Image (cartoon, grey):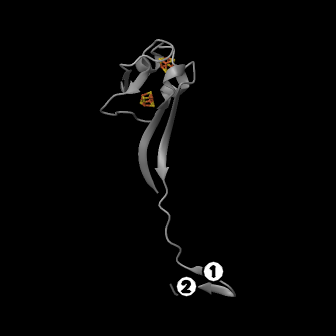
Amino acid sequence: MRKGDNLIDILEDWCKGCEICIKRCPVQALELSTELNKRGVYPPKLKENNECTFCRLCELLCPDFVISVTREEVKEVDEPKSKLIIGGVCNDI
Ligand code: SF4
Ligand code: SF4
């Protein structure tokens, strides 16, 4: 298994622009977007130099459930070392 990128999903149009997420992020990983959402506010976005530590504080503090933080984990699946065949197991592959 290898660790992948942290992913932050932001439902921009749900954001009401309170900026709690931006102000409380311990590593200042978020900033205001430059584009207004449908509610007429600037939602958060990750900064270019992504410093997110996957703490999930922004997700937990957002009153409007705008942010979801997930860590992408990619499982490297090993090729099977044996193959089940009719009548038994064949290890000769
Ligand atoms: S805490 Fe939620 S509602 Fe407030 S600015 Fe951040 S995403 Fe928007
Ligand atoms: S998960 Fe933590 S470090 Fe990442 S943006 Fe949210 S508050 Fe900041």
Q: Which of marks 1 and 2 is in front?
A: 1
Q: Name the residue under label 1.
A: 84
Left or right, 50 with respect to 68, comes to: left
Query: Which x, y percent locates residue 5?
Result: 41, 43
Residue 65, can we see it?
yes
Residue shown at 58% from the left, 80% from the top: 83
> Which is more N-terminal, label 2 or label 1?
1
Amino acid type indicated by mark 1: Leu
Residue shown at 46% from the left, 34% from the top: 8
Compared to residue 56, the image places residue 73 above or below, namely below
Element under disc 2:
loop
Q: In which quarter of the image is ligand 2?
A: top left
Query: Which x, y percent locates residue 3?
Result: 43, 50
Q: How crowded is mark 1: few (under 14 residues within 10 Å), some or many (20 or more)?
A: few
Element under disc 1:
strand
Q: Which quarter of the picture shows residue 90?
A: bottom right
Report the front residue among 31 and 43.
43
Q: Mark 2 points at which residue?
A: 91
Amino acid type indicated by mark 2: Asn
Query: Which x, y percent locates residue 69?
Result: 50, 34
Compared to residue 77, the image places residue 89 above or below, namely below
Residue furthest toward the left? 49
Q: Distance between the residues labelled 1 and 2?
A: 9 Å
Which label was assigned to residue 36?
none
